[in-house]
Image (cartoon, rainbow, N blue to C red):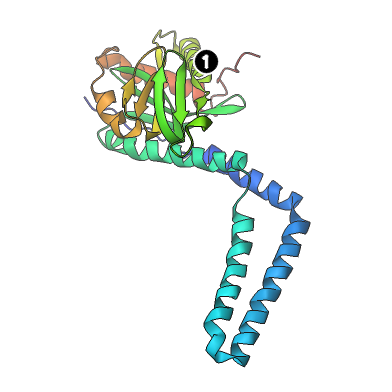
Amino acid sequence: MLFAMSSWGKAPGDSAQEKYDELLRSWRRRNRKPFVVVALVCGAILVASFGAARIWPPLAWCFGVFGGAALAFWLLARLTPPGWIENWQSGAWGEQATARALRELENEGWIVLHDLPMGRGNVDHIVIVPAGVYLLDSKRLGGVVSVDDQGVTVRRLDDPALTYRQAGDAHLLRLARQTHQQILSASRIRTWVTPVMVIWADFPQDVAEGRCTYVHGDQLVSWLRSRPAAIAPTRVRQVADAVRMAWDPTTQRAAQPEA
């Protein structure tokens, strides 16, 4: 059975991209003076290189290298914010990658919502089908990922000593519970919301299930299709409408998260 596609919510990754742009502008404002100094120095080198190339044509290629290096340094300095800011850009890319994977299901009529507000944060994606309601959180990680009873571990290939634990599963479980409560308050329909972390990285396990399910982005569509039915087809639309009542800002009924 096909279900009408949804246009609720923002475009995938919009919230993370907006946060990245906001932080990038703030970082540039705070460092305006150093950027001006770097721009003046690099500009002087660039102008001097062009002038020298005209005076000594045989060495034009050498001066061109100096000028190009000065321009590249300026661009690199301006376009490379601290890692904690770049993480927001990476998050937006992860959400967009998940949205591209889900587009195949949307084209078949699955109900998919993106970038929904939740208090101070947001829910990346919600998928509603007879197999249930799935809350997806996209993670784009650098390294080899493994999952065990303790959660997600990311191992850096170049230096295993930099292995770290990826937080987020507790937050994802909390979002799933809050979404369940919002659906219940909006419709009196009791349906569990399954939290899923979509991992875009080297993840040899592909799928790891527990309180939170971890799925490689490339396996997401096939995994969702394999889920057994949990909601009667006649009630899928009711659940979707309940989600709309909970999330659509025009209804003003979205419940606030607990303090």
Q: Residue at x 57, y 23 (%)?
A: 252
Horizontal side of residue 43 vs 112, given as left or right: right
- Residue 40 visible from this viewpoint: yes
The residue that disc 1 covers is 174
Along the line of sight, the residue nearer the viewer: 18 or 137 = 137
Q: x, y (%) of residue 151? A: 46, 18
Horizontal side of residue 147 vs 66, given as left or right: left
Along the line of sight, the residue nearer the viewer: 70 or 93 = 70
Label 1 residue SS: helix
Q: Residue at x 31, y 27 (%)?
A: 206
Along the line of sight, the residue nearer the viewer: 167 or 19 = 167
Horizontal side of residue 43 vs 254, given as left or right: right
Along the line of sight, the residue nearer the viewer: 40 or 56 = 56
Horizontal side of residue 167 vs 107, given as left or right: right
Q: Is residue 31 above or below residue 202?
A: below
Q: x, y (%) of residue 208? A: 34, 19
Residue that lies at the very extreme toward the right in this rendered image: 33
Q: Amino acid at mark 1?
A: Arg
- Residue 195 visible from this viewpoint: no
Instruction: Check the picture and name the quadrant holding the C terminus.
Output: top right
Q: Classify mark 1: residues with Cα within 10 Å, few (<14), some (14-19) or many (20+).
A: some
Q: x, y (%) of residue 207? A: 32, 23
Q: x, y (%) of residue 179? A: 48, 17
Q: Residue at x 52, y 81 (%)?
A: 61
Q: Is residue 194 above or below residue 33?
A: above
